[in-house]
Image (cartoon, helix red, strand yellow):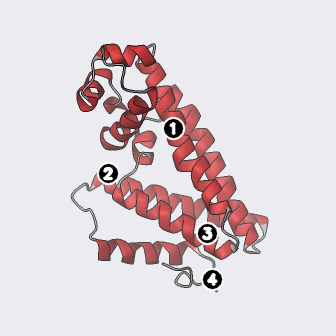
Amino acid sequence: MDMSLARTDWIDAALSALAQDGLAGVAVQPLARTLGASKGSFYWHFADRAALVTATLELWEQRETTAVIERIEAIDDPRERLVALGRGAYAGAAQGNAHASVLAAASDPRVRLVLGRVTRTRLAFLQRLYRDLGLKEDEATRRARVAYALYLGIGELRRADSHGDPTDAELDAYLELALATMLPPGVPADAAGA
């Protein structure tokens, strides 16, 4: 039994599989093959697949929401915070991240619970960023929802047209357009050190 693999190795591999193949990709045998490990190594760290799915969703939430918010909050200028968030989120969605796979698996109760929490956290953070720009609460709420809907749409479009991966130049153009849509009038997107 290969005990050299840590629990985190399995979770990292599961998160990659989730992004690539959806929730079905978070399965013991394929992950064991990917990691060059035995199923016994898996069961050393996890009681069952459900425990791995739960740990994978926790890692996704931590990396893609908690850590991102912490990184963005460290930026002083409110406009730069919003631009940095938009660039990272839209680029991740266009290049493929786990969010679209999590959305696709939302009928699973474990996924639905985490997805709901992540969505509420992200929308609240976006609303705060817009309020920090001086927008009133109702306008901040509307803009947060539109910006988030654009993010979701970019991810879904990538899933629907997997052969439509943008070139670097196309991705840059998409990001500029997405940021222009995301930012309130009078807040330039190009001044934030692209």
Instruction: Point out which mark residue 159 bears.
Output: 2
Q: Along the line of sight, which residue is nearer the eye, 178 or 18?
A: 18
Instruction: Point out which mark residue 82 bears.
Output: 3
Whole-number angstrom distance, CA of label 1 to CA of label 4: 34 Å
Q: In x, y percent, where is residue 8?
A: 45, 32
- Residue at mark 4: 187
In the image, what residue type sits under mark 1? Leu
Neighbours of disc 4 within 10 Å: few (<14), some (14-19), many (20+): some
In the image, what residue type sits under mark 3? Leu
> Is 122 left, or right, of 88 in this rendering?
right
- Marks 4, 2: nearer the viewer: 4
Q: Earlier in the sequence, mark 4 or mark 3?
A: 3
- Marks 1, 2: nearer the viewer: 1
Q: In x, y percent, where is residue 59?
A: 51, 38
Q: Earlier in the sequence, mark 1 or mark 4?
A: 1
- Marks 1, 4: nearer the viewer: 1
Whole-number angstrom distance, CA of label 4 to CA of label 3: 10 Å
Q: In x, y percent, where is residue 83?
A: 57, 72
Q: Quadrant of residue 116?
A: top right
- Residue at mark 1: 59
Whole-number angstrom distance, CA of label 2 to CA of label 3: 25 Å
Q: SS at mark 4?
A: loop
Q: SS at mark 2?
A: helix
Q: Residue drawn at (48%, 20%), measured in percent from left and top?
A: 51
Q: Quadrant of residue 113?
A: top right
Instruction: Point out which mark residue 79 bears.
Output: none
